[in-house]
Image: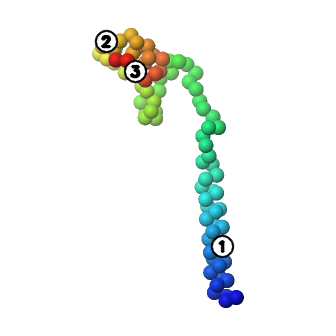
Amino acid sequence: MDPRKAVIGALAGGSMLAGIALGAAFTAGTGSSANAATTTPTSANTRADASASPGVFVSNEDPAHEATESAEREAQENAGQRPTVP
């Protein structure tokens, strides 16, 4: 066997093993989040601040806004739900 072919074969095999090792290292902790622990609020009136994640609903408690909304909408906001009624 030609020594150059042996070196090229060893380099190719080594690079494949290195790729497998790097792939395993980068994906080791990124499995499904279905088993991840979740936190739940301790109170129904817990209010998230505006700097929380963009998907968190924050009620508008401005007096001018409160005067124009329906009782149903206020009940949804107080329950921490995104309002679906005007």
Percent across and percent down for residue 58 are 42, 25
Q: Quadrant of residue 34?
A: top right
Disc on the earlier residue, 2 or 1: 1
Tell me the tag on residue 84: 3
Task: State the residue in front, 50 or 38.
Answer: 38
User: At 46% from the left edge and 35% from the top edge, which residue is drawn?
Assistant: 53
Q: Nearer the viewer, mark 2 or mark 3?
A: 3
Disc on the earlier residue, 2 or 3: 2
For label 1, the crowd category at 10 Å Cα-Cα, with few meaning under 14, some 14 to 19 and many 20 or more, is: few
Q: Is residue 8 above or below residue 58?
A: below
Tell me the tag on residue 67: 2
Residue bearing mark 1? 13
> SS at mark 3?
loop
The quadrant of the image that shows the N terminus is bottom right
Q: Quadrant of residue 36?
A: top right
User: At 37% from the left edge and 21% from the top edge, which residue is drawn?
Assistant: 60
Distance from the alpha carbon under mark 1 to that under mark 3:
59 Å
Figure label count: 3
Say whether residue 81 is visible. Answer: yes
Say whether residue 63 is visible. Answer: no
**Residue sitting at the far front:** 1
**Residue sitting at the far bottom:** 2
- The colour scheme used here is rainbow
User: At 62% from the left edge and 75% from the top edge, which residue is drawn?
Assistant: 12
> SS at mark 2?
helix
Residue type, mark 2 in image = Ala
> SS at mark 1?
helix
Q: Is residue 76 left or right of residue 64?
A: right
Percent across and percent down for residue 47 are 47, 23
